[in-house]
Image (cartoon, rainbow, N blue to C red):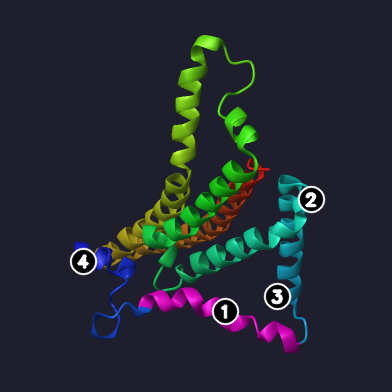
Amino acid sequence: MMSNLFSSFDPSSGILNIPLNWMSTLLGVMFFPYTLWAMPSRWTLAWSSVINTLHKEFKILLGPKNSTGTILFISLFSLIVFNNFLGLLPYVFTSTSHLSMTLSLALPLWVSFMVFGWVNHTQHMLAHLVPMSTPGPLMPFMVLIEMVSNLIRPGTLAVRLAANMIAGHLLLTLLGNTGPSLSISLLSILIFSQILLLLLESAVAVIQSYVFAVLSTLYASETN
């Protein structure tokens, strides 16, 4: 029962136990050349409007001097939201439900932000450890608290995304396993609830991608 429940999260369920499921993360790259020669469709126009909206929001967070850096966070949002929606399809591997995927996205970004900030803006980073209007006796404790909060940032980013993806998929699987033992009337209620949960998971897929990208942008803006 437990092996069937978590089988969709198994990265080694490919041929000869080779983790071919991770290759699904790169499927979005196959659609990039299509936009270079094909006529703009409604989908491409809608996605362009989403990118423009994200660019305006990230530009405000990063500042006008660093507006070109928004392409990094827009690409990060696109990668995560694609893999989140890909995991909603039946029998498709959800790479963003693994910490090895989410932590590999959050940790390099956080390390690069910290190295850039401490090397180029050392005084600003030191001043950021003590909030304004902090009483003198509390300053050592505030420095310790701020240091701990900075150190756990990549972990919180990774765990937040992975936990939300796992929770929704497990709930859909648990409800789906009860279907064969229900009557026709209860089965119709179960299908309706599954559809509502699927819509909720679609919203969670977008929201978690947006939260991951926005928090990464905020962490980058603090180093400038």
- Examine the image and state in which quarter residue 9 appears: bottom left
Tell me how far mark 3 sits from mark 4, CA to CA: 38 Å
Q: CA distance from mark 1 to mark 4?
A: 31 Å
The alpha-carbon separation of the residues under discs 1 and 3 comes to: 16 Å
Q: Is residue 33 magenta?
A: yes
Q: Quadrant of the N terminus?
A: bottom left
- Amino acid type assigned to the residue bearing label 2 in the image: Lys
Residue that badge 3 annotates: 43
Q: Main secondary structure of the magenta part?
A: helix
Query: How many dots with numbers?
Result: 4
The residue labelled by disc 4 is: 3
Please report whichever mark, 1 or 4, sits nearer to the chain's N-terminal start.
4
Whole-Å distance between the Cαs marked 2 and 3? Answer: 31 Å
User: Could you tell me if the residues under marks 3 and 4 are in contact, i.e. CB atoms within 8 Å?
Assistant: no
Q: Position of residue 140 (x, y in %)?
A: 47, 19
Alpha carbons under labels 1 and 2: distance apart: 29 Å
Foreground residue among 85 and 126: 126
Compare residues 43 and 100 and report the one nearer the observer: 100
Location of residue 76 (image quadrant): bottom right
Answer with the quarter of the image where residue 96 lies. Answer: bottom left
- List the residue tagged with mark 1: 29
